Image (spheres, grey):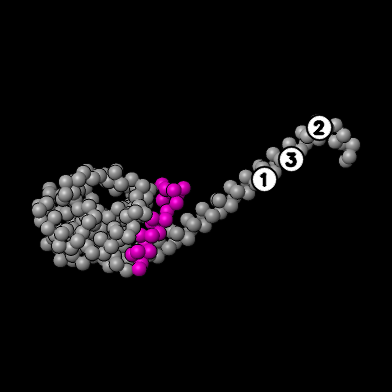
Amino acid sequence: MGRRFRNPSRRAEAMKAKKKIDRAGRLIVGVVVATVVTFTFQEVSWAQVADLLHELNLTTYSRPTTPPDFNGRTADGRDLSLASLKGKVVLFNFWATWCLECRPEMPAFERLHREFSAQGLAVVGINAREETTTIRAYAKELGLTFPLISDPTGKINSAYGVIGLPTTFLIGRSGRATALAIGPRDWSTKPARALIQALLAEPLALKGTR
């Protein structure tokens, strides 16, 4: 073995080759570890999501579904579209001031908005065919600060197939519809908060894989 590296240049070349092999080995190990972590997160996260959806009695989608885009205007005069919320977890609630079952959900939506908006949650209320003055008065009464879109002709309601109020849609960071609730739910519960947190924790690498 000693004779093999008597030539200094050959010995230097051999050492360089060994270093390259070592670096390649470390790279492969790193990729394998990252892959294992990613798939472990995916399996745990979406298993938990399925349980939470069931616990909240939310309807899921059997195949990837992209919600229809829309352009609307909030009661305070701001333009808002679904496309502008790309990359966020979106909670759409269709409601009206005359809807008695809608009212208890509003404070819970406001709490979710205040707690998780900085982490990427967008809570949006879409009002069914009422005047903006009525919407603003209702928001002031309940202390609502999340966007409330006016849908005076019912165009957005029709696009989403809403036939009863309240109706709530959850959309993941990938832009795919995640769940649907027809009728009221208790969005102030621990499972509801855990569901929002699980959707917000979706890794960027998993976007579009559903």
Which residue is depicted at the point 29% across and 43% down? 83
Q: Which residue is mark 2?
A: 10
Which residue is depicted at the point 42% across and 56% down? 201
- Horizontal side of residue 20 vs 199, given as left or right: right
> Looking at the image, is mark 3 or mark 1 earlier in the sequence?
3
Measure the C-alpha gap from mark 3 to mark 2. 12 Å
Q: Amino acid at mark 1?
A: Gly
Which residue is depicted at the point 15% across and 62% down? 141
Q: Amino acid at mark 2?
A: Arg
Which residue is depicted at the point 56% across and 54% down? 36
Q: Quadrant of residue 6?
A: top right
Q: Amino acid at mark 3?
A: Lys
Q: Which residue is mark 3?
A: 18
Q: Secondary structure at mark 1?
A: helix
The percent coordinates of residue 78 (x first, y second) are: 20, 45
> Looking at the image, is mark 2 or mark 1 earlier in the sequence?
2
Q: Which residue is mark 1?
A: 25
